[in-house]
Image: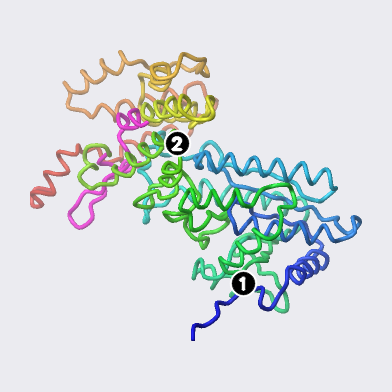
Amino acid sequence: MAETPYSIFDSRTPDDIHREIQEVYLENARPWVIGYSGGKDSTTALQLIWYALAELPPEKRKYPVYVISSDTLVETPVIVSYITGTLDQIEAKAREEKMPFQTDIVRPKVDDTFWVNLIGRGYPAPYTRFRWCTDRMKIRPANQFILDRVAEHGEVIMVLGVRKGESTTRDQVLSLHRMKNSLLSRHTTLPNAFVYTPVVDFTTDDVWMYLLSAASPWGGDNKQLLTLYRNTNAQGECPLVVDETTPSCGNSRFGCWTCTVVTKDKAMEGLIDNGEDWMIPLLEFRDFLAKTQNPEKKPEIREHRRRNGQITILNNKLVHGPYKLDFCKELLRRLLTTQQQVREAGPDSNIKLITDDELEEIRKIWRTERQDWEDAVPQIYAEIIEDRDWIVDDATSFTEKDKDILAAVCSEKGIPVTLVAKLLDTERQMDGMSRRAGIQSRIDEIFHEDWRSEQEVRSGLDNPNQQ
């Protein structure tokens, strides 16, 4: 005889869960921060909390409830549209019914965004062993919001829509930090922040049973959410990430359209299969990025030196560094072309896949760190999009013609052109400063970089006795 599947509703009713939420809210005089990702789990948690607090007298709803969503700036556009629309509904309904909910979207600082690091600094597309994007784009912005609320209120309760079984590591962490005789856990890294997980014992069936039987209190449509899951082939959602134990988005979850950690983006493919043809250029760009991880491509598109100027050899093999500047220029051209394509074919003719602030930051990095004397960003933008005004750099700058002259002189003298260019850029950046104490140490650092050419390095690998 088949065993009856477990359900939270075998032992508890929604009213029971409401009472638990009310007790936690009233007994812990702290504001709440709810991580809302737009998916089924966080929607269930938020909806339960709304109904629970709505049953309290207005005078007892005195602790603010912040509903925050994470926008990495490379989220799948369809999901972004759904989340922002929902947050607008929540904000409007909260004002109308005098509920203590406030909505916020947290975003990475411009220095931490995907495009600034990938195209600007040349970080390779993320993969399992080098997932540099998560900390910069998700953990830091969410944690900064929480720390700001801690500074404002002293302590906060972080509400996460996580469930048992999604991550063994997270199950262990939640159990390890659970406070005695309390439904709260201590946050693993943030001081004065506590964690409450109201749907931790729900199964996937419980979540959908609840959402399809209880109407959205802010006027949303949970059937639309179900359709979104069906259209994306999604089996889960990307939860608000506040530490490294949060499960990865995986290949069938809502998440970043640029994600190369997985082999295939089933969610985006599902949306395209269900009529969102305008997203094809996004998928093609993502697949192009994924192919840059092929070992045979690395010598062609990546520097032989690391960003610190050193050369790394492991098991007699060269470990490649960041993307070459020329390849970063190609990436920018492809991205802007993709933006034009989705503007023409998609529902938003003004969509920006990369922001103006990111373009300016990439331009600054190329000019100050990567010896882009041609000042290529404005040229590429004009070539693909249009002419526009750019921030004017008052400092004396070198030109493409200067680079050609320098290259000729360095070639004649047998000196690496990048070495001399970096020295000149360092002097230019510190020119006019009242204190130039750091210039000597910076020059010393540049001279101590490994200036061997890739050909010289490979020759040494092939003939170890000549090293």
- Tell me where residue 148 appears, x and y as whole percent: 70, 49
Q: Which of the 4 image quarters holds residue 288?
A: top left
Mark 2 or mark 1, which has the lower sequence index?
2
Where disc 1 sits, the SS reads loop
Q: Amino acid at mark 2?
A: Trp
- Tell me where residue 426 appears, x and y as whole percent: 41, 28
Q: Amino acid at mark 1?
A: Asp
* Frontmost residue, 35 versus 17: 17
Task: Identify the residue under disc 2.
Answer: 115
- Highlighted range, magenta: 303-331
Q: Left or right: 313 with respect to 11? A: left
- Tell me where residue 70 appears, x and y as whole percent: 59, 47
* Frontmost residue, 15 versus 248: 15
Of tags 2 and 1, the one toward the viewer is: 1
For label 1, count other residues whose C-alpha is less than 10 Å away and answer few (under 14), some (14-19) or many (20+).
some
Q: Which of the 4 image quarters holds residue 121?
A: top left
241 magenta-colored: no
Up the image or down, 367 lies above or below 118; here it is above
Task: Please tell me which residue is depicted at 23% across the width and 48% down the height of the picture.
Answer: 295
C-alpha separation, residue under disc 2 versus residue under disc 1: 38 Å
Task: Identify the residue under disc 1.
Answer: 201
Q: Left or right: 296 with respect to 87? A: left
